[in-house]
Amino acid sequence: MTAADIGTGIAMVLVIEGLVYALAPSLVERLLEALRLMPIDARRALGLATLATGMLLLWIFRG
C-alpha cells in the first residue's frame, strides 16, 4: 500500500461523505441524533462491525 493508495482512500471517503451531506442533510441530523441516543457499547459494537466490514471489503477487492 502506497501513500497514493492512502490518499485515494481518504479522498473517496470525503467524496462520499460530502455527497451525503449535500443530498440528505436532514437524514444526517436524524442519524446523528439516533447515534447520540444509542448506548456507548452499542456504538462501539457498530464501529467494530463497520471496521470489520471495511477490512473484509479491502481484502476482497485488493486481494
Image: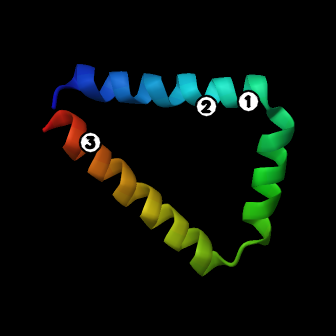
**SS class, disc 1:** helix
Q: Residue at x 83, y 51 (%)?
A: 30
> Would you say the residues marked 2 and 1 are in contact, meaning their CB atoms lie under 8 Å apart?
yes
Q: Residue at x 77, y 65 (%)?
A: 36
Structural distance between the alpha carbons of marks 3 and 2: 19 Å
Res. 48 image quadrant: bottom left
Instruction: Give residue 33's position: percent from left, percent from top.
Output: 82, 58
Contact (Cβ within 8 Å) of mark 1 with mark 3: no
- Judged from this view, the residue extending furthest toward the front is 60
How many other residues sit within 10 Å of disc 3, few (<14), some (14-19) or many (≥20)?
few
Write down the residue under mark 1: 21
Say which quarter of the image contains residue 38. bottom right
Q: How far apart are labels 1 and 3 at the CA level?
A: 25 Å
Disc 2 marks a residue whose amino acid type is: Glu
- State the residue position of label 2: 17
| Mark number, residue 42 | none
Nearer to us of marks 3 and 2 is 3
Q: Mark 2: few, some, or many residues within 10 Å (few <14, many ≥20)?
A: few
Q: Check disc 3 and report its element: helix, strand or loop.
A: helix
> Distance between the Cα atoms at labels 2 and 1?
6 Å
Q: Is residue 3 above or below residue 56?
A: above
Q: As drawn, is 48 to the left or to the right of 43?
A: left
Earlier along the polypeptide chain: callout 3 or callout 2?
2
Q: Amino acid at mark 3?
A: Leu
Q: Which residue is mark 3?
A: 58
Q: Point out residue 7 in the picture as x, y percentages from the top left corner.
A: 34, 23
